[in-house]
Amino acid sequence: MDTGTDISQLLDDFEHGRVPLLEFMRTACRLREESGMEPMPELGTAVVACFGRHTEGRDLMTCILEIEGFRVIKADRDSTVQKTVEMCRDPNVTVLCYSVQTTYDCPDLMNVSELLEEEGIRERIILNIGGSPITPGLAERMGCDVYAPTAVQSVRAMKSEVLRRKAGRPQ
């Protein structure tokens, strides 16, 4: 089996609950190193952030985004929403992804889309906010461009949307 197939199988196994989180992360890192995977320039850069001590979700999204070909910048765990939005000023950034652990964090994220708009960068940033408390309705109210119930599906939706926009295809 080649490394690409191994990674694809690992993603599928993780998404369907057949591989625990820590095993997934260790194996994914090993497979990425063995394969010498490089980011796909056409996908650009993803900024990944979290709230408080919820670094597991941020690190999981980072891992999956890298597997799917994104270059990733992880925000510090204590980064404010404003500081994270400012990280998106880099013209190579195409995605802003937040991982949320509790509904307590949700009010702080209700204006992320507006902050991106104020920066004049909203049209090129694909916004995804995910985690266990996020529902499709909440994601819509937050202004998310993509929503999916799992981390793997979210990353694939972000990738698809980046490629669709780069190709200039209508929604």
Image (cartoon, rainbow, N blue to C red):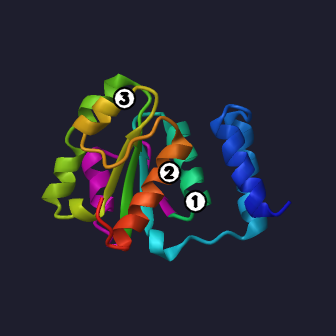
**Residue type pointed to by label 3:** Thr
Boundaries of the magenta span: 71-91
Q: Magenta includes 72?
A: yes
Q: Is residue 79 left or right of residue 112?
A: right
Q: Which residue position is annotated with label 3?
A: 135
Q: Earlier in the sequence, mark 3 or mark 1?
A: 1
Q: Is residue 25 visible?
A: no
Where is residue 48 shown, x and y percent of the image? 44, 51
Q: Quadrant of the C terminus?
A: bottom left
As shown in the figure, which amino acid type bears the numbered disc 1? Glu
Q: CA distance from mark 2 to mark 3?
A: 16 Å
Q: Is residue 68 visible?
A: yes
Q: CA distance from mark 3 to mark 1?
A: 24 Å
Instruction: State the residue position of label 2.
Output: 155
SS at mark 2?
Answer: helix
**As shown in the figure, which amino acid type bears the numbered disc 2?**
Val
Identified at 54% across, 72% down, the residue is: 40
Most distant residue in the front direction = 170
Residue at the limit of the structure toward the right, as seen here: 1
Q: Residues within 10 Å of mark 3 (few under 14, many from 20)?
A: some
Disc on res. 68: 1
